Image: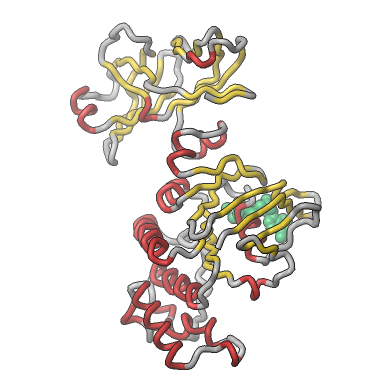
Amino acid sequence: MSIDVRNVTKTFGSYTALSDVNLHVKDGELVALLGPSGSGKTTLLRIIAGLEIPDDNPGSSILFHGEDVARRQVGERQVGFVFQHYALFKHMSVFENIAFGLRVRPRHLRPSNDEINEKVNRLLKLIQLENLGKRFPAQLSGGQRQRVALARALAIEPRVLLLDEPFGALDAKVRQGLRNWLRRLHDELHVTSILVTHDQEEALEVADRVVVMNNARIEQVGTPSEVFHNPASEFVMDFLGNVNVFHGRIENGQAQLGNLLVNVPSMEQKPAQNANVYIRPHELQIELHANGTPSLPATVSRINPAGSYAKIVLAASDGRELQVDLPFEQFAELNLHAGDHVFVSPKKVRVFVPEYVI
Ligand SMILES: Nc1ncnc2c1ncn2[C@@H]1O[C@H](COP(=O)(O)OP(=O)(O)OP(=O)(O)O)[C@@H](O)[C@H]1O
């Protein structure tokens, strides 16, 4: 089922938590709301759920499959929830926790006991906890509890699944496992899902599209690749991964990065102005000798080879700190050590000026 958020604003007293937000979520899509703390992600999710009411502005609406649900209560929206803090019933077994939403249905809508048994067993299998139905929540790990919370949300066959930092309280390894598992589950079930997270890696790995939020507004909506490789704003560039930032000037199609001039042909016709130049760590290259291409002299300060890339921290000759991620073959070839004098040059730059983005 598709979801449309149209011109939604939400104020709490004099504080604006959402400012004229518009969003379309396609049927069967998994969308991540990504942004720093306080950017409005949870408020937007709660408004979609019907747990929070948007300001009463003309033209403001929430549509499920084209139908305005503004006056529909939470219970009528057929929404499944999973929150960060597993809200499982402690005194109920895993099986009963999952069955709960079905057992509390009005008598004429309630499935028979046999149907409930069959459905819960199917869900237990889906979350790979077939043998743990009789356990109580206290006897499960954090990751297992979140899988039960997800099965419980799915039991009512929601039209929409809303997940608010569902893995936020778990350690990195478990998070990673559940993330992959959630993606596979989504590919199997195709329930339209919205996942709130402040973890950019999680959003980029799991979601079909990422909605980047900042200060009560949506900064950009796009596929993980679009938002990462073509950020629409400095905020998105900065929020999605590490960056080297140069506050400089752009003139005659050239950006000045410290002592280095870099060609930015698309800025040739633009008047001279101040600009911020962003370069991701993997977009800088290191040479042992100046080879004629424009480069910044720098000294290696630290090397961290523990990861899928070697992370090199350098001090440029003007004192600025630079971060470079190098593939291991290249790192081995350069045979770098702290204290080495090298030359750093950008393979790619992104220039942001007040009204212009390259
Ligand atoms: N009921 C409320 N009353 C007053 N202010 C609120 C209320 N709910 C949210 N806010 C404020 O609105 C802003 C957005 O909150 P929201 O929970 O949507 O942010 P978030 O992006 O989900 O952040 P986090 O990642 O920390 O949960 C915050 O500054 C918050 O303090």
206 lies left or right of 56: left
Quadrant holding the N terminus: bottom right
Q: Residue at x 48, y 65 (%)?
A: 191
Q: How many labels does the image show?
A: 0
Q: Where is residue 34 in the image (x, y as percent from the top left)?
A: 53, 48
Q: Where is residue 93 in the image (x, y as percent from the top left)?
A: 44, 85
Q: In this view, does 318 lie above or below 202?
A: above
46 lies left or right of 120: right
310 lies left or right of 329: right
Ligand 1 quarter of the rendering = bottom right
Q: Is residue 311 above or below residue 214?
A: above
Q: Report which quarter residue 133 is drawn in.
A: bottom left
Q: Is residue 65 above or below residue 293?
A: below
14 lies left or right of 88: right
Q: In this view, does 338 lie above or below 208?
A: above
Q: As rendered, which of 205 and 108 lies closer to the eye?
A: 108
Q: Which residue is drawn at 37% across and 78% down?
A: 124
Q: Position of residue 184 (x, y in %)?
A: 36, 61
Q: Can residue 290 be seen in this view?
A: yes
Q: Where is residue 91 in the image (x, y as percent from the top left)?
A: 49, 86
Its colouring scheme is secondary structure
